[in-house]
Image (cartoon, helix red, strand yellow):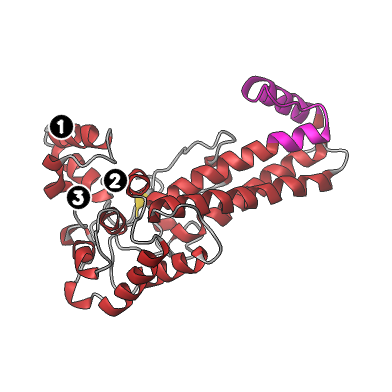
């Protein structure tokens, strides 16, 4: 469709009319305002991925939606040990373009390609810079709010960025389960790393001094009264880890669908305690799944 502005115009007009009727595509300003909403939806979705440790794995432009929906995520995964450089996609293992920590930037890059495609319709294409700036503003805003919720802060304020950076650094000193760490952090009654032991893969490697230093800083920031309701609503108890899905697949291949059914019921309420599921599913990745195909990384055809 290169150079076919008539078809491009018809496509954009129909898209805005059918899916974003509160916007107009009849002017540069109308298009920019519509694109700002697309930017915000995209940024919000990715901020949520980051909040729960989800890695899409194949964030090509054709795998993203103007509605901020998650589509075509074959090689997906949730972080087990917290590793910002992890990607679940075998075909991404050399460049790690779609690694966990890069998802916000890839969202911006993909959104910029959308802006390029719309530019032929603009009288002043430079005004599209406002839409791109709005993506970064939205992502920073959503990310800050997510961190405030995860850590039980009253709001994200100056200096909290350092608190977050220190936390993510300490989490990488030894293999640390992200889901268990944050859920457990939501319930501790004092700043003592001994209460977080369940989140670590090797207890003898726990950097207790570094953890206690960070916990003291966090405890002081929240005046010893973190917003626990906010934390429990932001930090899921259960996520669909790949090894869990593999267990369901293994059982289904034997015509036993009970594991799939149990996971389905559990994941309807990922933020609830569900005592009956805790021992089996609120747990670190088992050693058998560390390098098993389908549990550690997947291909695009998985």
Label 3, on which residue? 282
Structural distance between the alpha carbons of marks 2 and 3: 9 Å
Residue 118 appears anywhere in the view: yes
Relative height, residue 122 to residue 129 (above, below): above
Label 1 SS: loop
User: Does 20 sit left or right of 251 as displayed?
Assistant: right
Identify the residue at the far right of this view.
123
Residue at the (19%, 69%) spot, across then down? 194
Secondary structure at badge 3 equals loop
Which numbered mark, 3 or 1, is in the foreground of this view?
Answer: 3
State whether residue 19 is above or below residue 174.
Answer: above
Nearest to the observer: residue 151 or residue 266? 151
Q: Residue 39 at what x, y percent from top left?
A: 63, 42
**Mark 1, residue position:** 257
Residue 175, horizontal then vertical, whole percent: 28, 69
Mark 3 or mark 1, which has the lower sequence index?
Answer: 1
The x, y position of residue 38, in whole percent, is: 63, 38
Range covered by the magenta-colored residues: 6-34
Task: Indicate which disc residue 208 carries.
Answer: none
* Quarter of the figure with the C terminus: top left
Q: Looking at the image, tell me whether mark 2 or mark 1 is earlier in sequence order.
A: 2
**172 or 261: nearer the eye?**
172
Labels in figure, total: 3
Q: How far apart in space, not on screen, are marks 2 and 1 (Cα)?
A: 19 Å
Residue corresponding to mark 2: 239
Residue 301 in the figure: left or right of residue 121: left
Q: Main secondary structure of the magenta part?
A: helix
Badge 1: how crowded within 10 Å, few (<14), some, or many (20+)?
Answer: some
Does the segment drawn in magenta span residue 138? no
């Amino acid at each position: 469709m290169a150079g076919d502005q008539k078809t491009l115009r018809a496509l954009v007009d129909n898209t805005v009319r059918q899916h974003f009727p509160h916007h107009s595509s009849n002017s540069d300003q109308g298009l920019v305002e519509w694109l700002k909403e697309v930017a915000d939806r995209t940024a919000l979705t990715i901020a949520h991925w980051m909040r729960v440790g989800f890695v899409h794995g194949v964030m090509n432009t054709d795998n993203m939606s103007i509605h901020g929906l998650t589509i075509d995520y074959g090689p997906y995964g949730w972080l087990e040990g917290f590793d910002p450089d992890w990607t679940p996609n075998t075909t991404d293992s050399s460049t790690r373009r779609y690694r966990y920590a890069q998802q916000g930037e890839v969202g911006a890059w993909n959104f910029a390609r959308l802006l390029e495609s719309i530019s032929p319709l603009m009288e002043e294409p430079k005004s599209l810079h406002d839409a791109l700036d709005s993506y970064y503003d939205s992502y920073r805003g959503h990310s800050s709010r997510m961190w405030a919720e995860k850590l039980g802060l009253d709001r994200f304020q100056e200096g909290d960025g350092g608190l977050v950076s220190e936390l993510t650094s300490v989490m990488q000193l030894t293999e640390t389960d992200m889901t268990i760490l944050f859920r457990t952090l939501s319930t501790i009654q004092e700043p003592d790393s001994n209460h977080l032991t369940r989140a670590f893969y090797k207890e003898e490697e726990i950097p207790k001094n570094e953890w206690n230093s960070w916990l003291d800083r966090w405890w002081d920031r929240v005046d010893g009264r973190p917003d626990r309701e906010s934390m429990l609503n932001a930090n899921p108890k259960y996520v669909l880890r790949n090894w869990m899905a593999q267990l369901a697949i293994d059982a289904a291949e034997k015509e036993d669908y009970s594991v799939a059914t149990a996971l389905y019921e559990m994941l309807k309420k990922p933020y609830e305690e569900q005592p009956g599921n805790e021992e089996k599913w609120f747990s670190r990745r088992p050693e058998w799944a560390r390098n098993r195909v389908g549990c550690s990384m997947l291909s695009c055809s998985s």
